[in-house]
Image (tube, helix red, strand yellow):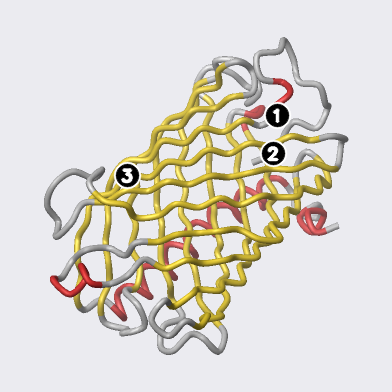
Amino acid sequence: MLWQLFDFLPRRHISNCAIFTVALMLTLSLDSLAQQRKIEYPHTVFWSELELNEMFTDTLGVGLDIVIRRKNAMNQGSMFDYRLRESIRPWFHYQFSQNARFSLSPIGYFVTNEFLAKPEDWNRPEYHEFRISSQFFHHLKQWEGRIIHTWRYRHEVRMQYNPITETYRLFQRFMFRYRIRVLLNSTDFYDDQVLYAVASNEFGLNFGEGVVFNTFNQNRFYAGMGIRLLNALRIELRYINHYRTRGSTGFEFDTSQGLMIGLYIDQLSSLGQDQYTLPIRFYD
């Protein structure tokens, strides 16, 4: 299995791999930005996410994520003023172990309103998009479970509808994310009322015939705090720093900062119960 590729490494080497992963991601991201940075348009944003999961057996389950994002305009006003993104995406999970999972979303629906940075942006219509997504993640724990490293690899087939030409633009994107969580008052991430700090960095690359100029798509960094309530519900409050290419020009970029609230239910049937109903408890 894929996660067993790391079994031959001593623990200290796995730790070094985690450090190397972070350094590599930051180096690649900053190098890409340094080479391409020409014109930047700043924004303030608010992101929110609801994620539901239910495992029916030790290996099989389903999930659903719903995303709502808001933005300001012309770098003025509140982060809640205008629509940015709404999406809904179902998932099917295959849990290899508590350390690894593969997930497939056969179809997801997204509605996007672009950032408003220039006068001509007000005339840009919203676009609708369908995505086929697959992802694999694995994790390891250190310091008796107080530190959790997670790596996620996501592939997306994206079909964006152009209302002007009434055609679809087809292209693909690969996203790579590293995340670290540090438990502050427990050694078990699934203890009720566990409090933890979290930080993550993710970058994306576009590819396919529909990609005219850019391969670098975006970089997302966030850091914040989380708490578990009602046994299966996690609430996270994060600071977001987002950098992405603007269309296919190759010299314009949107930079946004703001807040994110995430609600995550790891096992819907365990919400409010005394304990989890399944021995497999690690989901994401």
Nearer to us of marks 2 and 1 is: 1
Query: In the rendered structure, which amino acid carries the disc numbered 1?
Result: Gln
In 3D space, how far apart are the residues under numbered discs 2 and 3 (Cα atoms)?
Answer: 25 Å
Q: From the viewer's perspective, is residue 279 above or below residue 95?
A: above
Disc 1 element:
loop
Q: Are marks 2 and 3 in contact (CB under 8 Å)?
A: no
Classify 90 as above or below 148. below
Quadrant of the drawing holding the C terminus: top right
Residue at (76%, 20%) from the top-left corner? 276
Quadrant location of residue 108?
Answer: bottom right
Name which residue type carries label 2. Tyr
Which quadrant holds residue 219?
Answer: bottom left
Q: Quadrant of the N terminus?
A: bottom right
Q: Is residue 242 left or right of residue 133?
A: left
The residue carrying mark 1 is 267
Task: Indicate which disc residue 46 carries.
Answer: 3
Between marks 1 and 3, how big is the CA–CA gap? 26 Å
Specify whether 28 is left or right of 264.
Answer: left
Q: Which mark is residue 283?
A: 2
Percent from the top left, x then y, of residue 180? 53, 42
Marked residue nearer the N-terminal end (1 or 3) = 3
Q: Position of residue 66 (x, y in %)?
A: 53, 44
Answer yes or no: do the residues labelled 2 and 1 have beta carbons within 8 Å? yes
Outermost residue, top direction? 274
Residue 188 in view (yes/no): no
Amino acid at pointer 3: Phe
